[in-house]
Image (cartoon, helix red, strand yellow):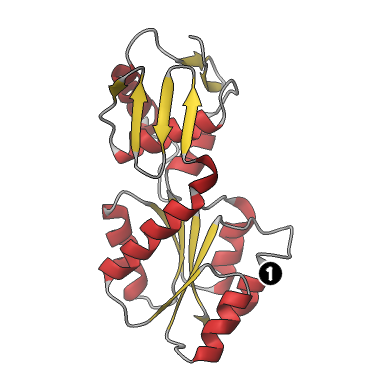
Amino acid sequence: MRILLVEDDRDLGPVLALGLRNEAYAVDLAQNYAEAEALLCSNDFDVACLDLGLPDGDGLELLRRLGADPALRRPRRLLVLTARDAVDDRVAGLDAGADDYLVKPFSFQELAARLRALARRADVRDAVLTVGDLRLDAAAHRAWRGGAELDLTPREFSMLRYLMHHPGRTVSAEELLEHVWDANADPFTASVRVILSRLRRKLGEPGPISTVNGVGYVLRAAP
């Protein structure tokens, strides 16, 4: 799952980002309104964790824009992180489009639990994906080929899920980096090839993932 974390606190932001990455999330950290806006213009996120008190703009305004401005790509779920704990502030955030509201100070464990809950809600429409003899349960974080369950790492699972969302379509390495990794990933490394090689090994033969030379990779229902 790819998360946009918008937090202007120079100490708290990196700590939260590191903690979430240790939970196997791909995390992009924005520390002001302008950085968040730039990331939302060019990336797709599963969840955005948005601080309302930003130094160069109003987080509530950004929240409203996500539902109205076609230049911004709205994340599937929105979680507000803020020190504003008045009832009116909570209502304003939820009315502006937030799915949940977490008041500072909060524990990292509660943040992680809220994100897991949002992920389950986001996965309701596609909780179980099926492509050929592959089956993936996004909510339970489990996958099978035929009747055998696959032992996948979080990154392998995310890659398989993305490919299963786009069966029969060639997906480039850059697209996988964008959706399975965060912005800190080095596009010049062999990360995609390494994870893909491990995933192919675990999927077994005949291999459902084909390489299109110079273009990318395609998952086929009937290899």
Name the spot of residue 20 as percent of width and height, x first: 32, 58
Percent across and percent down for residue 13 are: 37, 70
Residue 127 can be seen in this image: yes
Q: Is residue 203 above or below residue 127?
A: above
The residue positioned 61% from the left and 65% from the top of the image is 37
Quadrant hosting residue 93: bottom right
| In front of the other: 208 or 130 | 130
Asked if residue 145 is positioned above or below residue 162 in the image, the reply reads above
Residue 136, located in which quarter of the rendered image? Answer: top left
Could you say whether the residue bearing mark 1 is in a helix, strand or loop? Answer: helix
Viewer-proximal residue, 10 or 163?
Answer: 163
Residue 42 drawn at (x, y percent): 61, 52
Q: Is residue 69 above or below residue 11?
A: above
Q: Residue at x 29, y 60 (%)?
A: 18
Q: Amino acid at mark 1?
A: Arg
The answer, for residue 58, to whether it is visible in the render is no
Instruction: Report crowding for label 1: few under 14, some 14 to 19, many 20 or more residues within 10 A (C-alpha).
Output: some
Image side of residue 96 versus residue 135, left or right = right
Residue 159 point in image, percent of width and height:
42, 34
Which residue: 32% across, 82% down? Answer: 105
Side (left or right) of 191 relative to 122: left
- Name which quarter of the figure residue 138 lies in: top left
Q: Is residue 222 above or below residue 91?
A: above
Residue indicated by mark 1: 65
Judging depth in this view, the residue of 74 and 116 nearest the camera is 116
Query: How many numbered badges does the structure rendering display?
Result: 1
Picture residue at 48% right of the left edge, 9% below the top = 223
Left or right, 149 with reference to 95: left
